[in-house]
Amino acid sequence: MKTTVCVVGGGPAGLVLGLLLARQGIQVIVLEKHADFLRDFRGDTVHPSTLDVLDDLDLGPAVQRLPGRAANGLRATFDDGSFRIADFSRLRGRHRYLLFLPQWDLLDLLADAAAQLPTFTLLRSTEAVGLTRDGSGRVTGVRAVSRADESRAEDSRAEVLIEAQLTVACDGRGSTIRDVLGLRPLEHAAPMDVLWFRLPKPAEESELLEMRVMAGGLMLQIDRGDYFQCAYVVPKGGFATVKGHGLEALRRRVVRMSPQLEESVRSLESWDDVKLLTVRIDRLRRWHAPGVLLIGDAAHAMSPIGGVGINLAVQDAVATARLLGPKLFAGTLEDADLARVARRRWLPTVVTQGVQRIAQAGLVAPVLAADSQSDRPVRAPRALHVLSKYPVLQAIPAYFVGRGVLPERVR
């Protein structure tokens, strides 16, 4: 099988990149290891910068028909009160909100739009397992395995060889392509991991996006209509300790943070209802090798703070298509061109990770280190009091989260 570009990973970055390249008349194959997108994703946040990109692709009306919920602010509740951190309604532009949208709906939309283009191919149930190289060591394509039925035995898999002028790894923080290349990211310590679970939503009204903070922990509640998606933050490596205290202890902690969930927490019946997200912040020093480029989480894993990881990955994809597309179409792409993508996306990656690390060190780490049995109140940082006193300043965190550093547009 031969193509111009082989994209490894059918997530938001991979599908956006495949769609944008195919719109330029470039032959592209996207590999997706699963048969469909119906999985419980954690990153369901679509930010204004990504909504702008979808508008550029004429997909805005279709997005509006999907079952999303718009949040125009983020509120945090401490022992000394409740404070609005970001007000997205103060942003300029058409999209002045965060859209919480099931990721499988977004991926289906992107895949269906790309499938209308004759130069696009999506290979489902096809997993990249290695790379092919020429005599000089240059990457010339991908070795993959394909299964028509994911439930079939391991030895029923068929090998697929894809020859490509360029291979782009969009296969996430556990990137197979990155491991095959032997690339090791620069890692930054993270003080936390996150437990994800769903709770039935009480009848009373609530903020669509709210964080509860108390000594020893914090929890983000995302209103998904008839249920809350909860992100319960624990110390790094602390899931075993939480499990050791028992599920009832976790229920009590959740109720202490959010009393309105007293009835809802009964729906946590076993640890199977709780999923662990191991938090990492890292980035590659070099995003490319001859014949291959890494973008998104494969190049830089982000903290869940701000929920910006997927949106940064989409911005990487837009920049990649804009910078490399014309040369791929003309057949003049050189390895030096791959470095242009990394240079373009270096600043937003470094700045975003820097702000996330500051938030982790200034808020998350002290809260997690506080004695949960102590009666000493956890007070909001001084900065939140300033934001509350001068609401116009809430546009600053809203811009950083909603649009980010150096947002990309489709041209």
Image (cartoon, grey):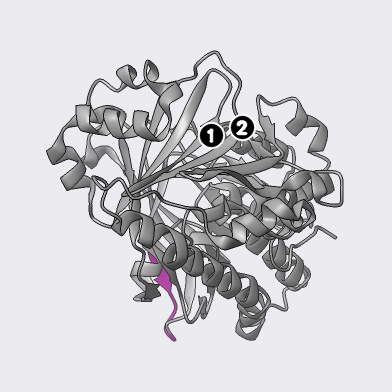
Residue at (79% x, 54% y) in the render: 392
The magenta span reads 130-136
Q: Amino acid at mark 2?
A: Leu
Please say whether residue 248 is one of the residues in the magenta stretch. no
Image position, residue 96 (x, y; %):
79, 44
Which quadrant: the C terminus?
A: bottom right
Residue type at mark 1 is: Ile
Q: Residues within 10 Å of mark 1 (few under 14, many from 20)?
A: many
Q: Is residue 399 left or right of residue 154?
A: right
Vertical comparison of 200 with 230: above or below: above
Badge 2 element: loop
Percent coordinates x, y for residue 207 in the rendering: 61, 31
Q: Is residue 141 visible?
A: no
| Residue pointed to by mark 2 | 208
Q: Nearer the viewer, residue 369 or 146?
A: 369
Task: Give x and y (percent) for residue 159.
Answer: 35, 50
Residue shown at 64% from the left, 80% from the top? 343
Q: Which residue is mark 1?
A: 222
Q: Image quadrant of residue 190? A: bottom left
